[in-house]
Amino acid sequence: MTDPAGVILAGGRATRMGGGDKGLRRVGDRRLIDHVIDRLAPQCAALAINANGDPARFAEFGLPVLADSLPDHPGPLAGVLAGLDWAAAEGYAAIVTAAADTPFFPRDLARRLAADAGPSGLALAASRDADGKLWRHPTFGLWPVALREDLRSALRGGLRKIVLWTDAHGAGLAEFPATPFDPFFNVNTPEDIARAEDLRALL
């Protein structure tokens, strides 16, 4: 299958939000994860959610819920690995990931990531701020299934920082404009919910 599968990374513990699932918090009349599904689903051949704990809380979405295969919440890379294992079983060659707390990411994310992928097939999203600084957004990436065993070994060896692994594999960068605001703005705190409400008016 040529189109990538999509995986929504919702495995974080939301400590700055007071715990629980950030993706189920509301922005306007919809939850964050509703916004994410709306943007990611048209870009991918199939969709799944990476989350730990009781999968029943996501049952209404009718999507596979993928738990981390490694214990103790090792971070987003474990969610990427869970997505790659699922994609491999389903016959997909790659996945595109998006964070569950980022409601405004680009609707052409998957296409741009594929266009800017490095030789390994890896790519991360990035945006440049008003000062010209480039910010990488490592939970938004294109990940080839062919690298999943390498990732598994790295995680078992203690690696946790996404960019250390992606840099080692020559990941490309897909740069997106940050005007009128950074499309990778994510909701970490209750104050960010209010900010997201304001940003909706700019869309």
Image: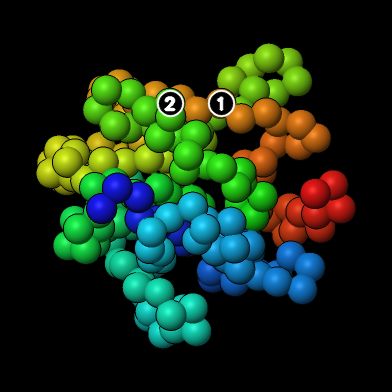
* Residue displayed at 17% across by 41% down: 146
Question: Cβ–Cβ below 8 Å for labels 2 and 1?
Answer: yes
Q: Nearer the viewer, residue 138 or 93?
A: 93
Residue corresponding to mark 1: 175
Counting the numbered discs, the total is: 2
Under circle 1, the secondary element is: strand
Q: Is residue 137 above or below residue 130?
A: below
Q: Is residue 24 left or right of residue 158?
A: right
Q: CA distance from mark 2 to mark 1?
A: 9 Å
Report if residue 19 is visible in the image: no
* Residue displayed at 42% across by 49% down: 97
Residue 65: x %, y % from top left = 35, 72
Under circle 2, the secondary element is: loop
* Residue displayed at 36% across by 36% down: 162
Q: Nearer the viewer, residue 192 or 99?
A: 99
Residue 50: x %, y % from top left = 38, 63
Of callouts 2 and 1, the N-terminal one: 2
Q: Is residue 25 above or below residue 167?
A: below
* Residue type pointed to by label 2: Asp
Q: Is residue 103 above or below residue 119?
A: below
Residue corresponding to mark 2: 116
